[in-house]
Image (cartoon, grey):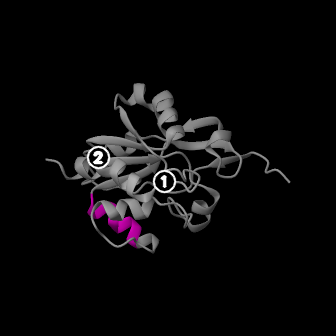
Amino acid sequence: MPQEPQRITHTLEPIFDDASRVLVLGTMPSPKSREVSMYYGNPQNRFWRVLAGLWGEETPASNEERRELCLRRHVALWDVLASCTIKGASDASIADPVPNDIARVLAVAPIRQVFCTGATATRLYRRLIESELGVPCVGLPSTSPANARMRLDDLLAAYTCVREAAEGD
């Protein structure tokens, strides 16, 4: 039976503090991420392996370890959308998108660069947020298991710019 579209409201708080230097934005938490109350909560998603791998760290297992990794490495984490209509975790099915108030993070954190994970997050950021905020984004490949053509090493290479922006002076 095909899944029906649902109106979803974002329930996860952004991860950031006054030392965050880069902002990484996904599209919207998947059903699994909402279930476990953490970004990129699907164990098949490679985001946490990539982020930890950028600094040669062990992949964090718990939500607290994931949060600590982000803050220790000056990475703010949130999503482009505050709400949308979506079928399951299919970014391609997104309709009626409403953006998050990204300025909320920028008011506190000295963000140097915004990165979007995946083509849909990048497209929605550019369409709904970029001109109002005046901060361009860099589009990165999705770490989703649906993006199987990208090997972990390819993702690490593509995401190196996140580490460079977070560490740069």
| Residue type at tag 1 | Thr
**Frontmost residue, 58 versus 80:** 58
Callout 1: helix, strand or loop?
loop
Callout 2: helix, strand or loop?
helix
Q: Where is residue 78 in the image (x, y as percent from the top left)?
A: 45, 50
Q: In this view, does 3 lie to the left or right of 22?
A: right
Res 34 → quadrant: bottom right
Q: Which residue is drawn at 34% across and 61% down?
A: 70
| Residue type at tag 2 | Cys
| Range shown magenta | 65-73
- Mark 1–mark 2 Cα distance, whole angstroms, equals 15 Å
Q: In this view, does 153 lie to the left or right of 80?
A: left
Q: Where is residue 24 in the image (x, y as percent from the top left)?
A: 39, 48
Q: In this view, does 34 lie to the left or right of 116?
A: right
Please give the residue where the numbered disc 1 appears in the rendered image: 143
Q: Position of residue 47 (x, y in %)?
A: 45, 58
Q: Main secondary structure of the magenta part?
A: helix
Q: Earlier in the sequence, mark 1 or mark 2?
A: 1
Q: Is residue 105 magenta?
A: no
Q: Is residue 66 magenta?
A: yes
Please give the residue where the numbered disc 2 appears in the rendered image: 161
Q: Which mark is residue 165?
A: none
Q: Is the Cβ of the residue at disc 1 closer than 8 Å to that at disc 2?
A: no
Q: Total number of numbered labels?
A: 2
Q: Which residue lies furthest to the top in this view?
A: 131
**Frontmost residue, 133 versus 27:** 27
Q: In which quarter of the image is the N terminus?
A: bottom right
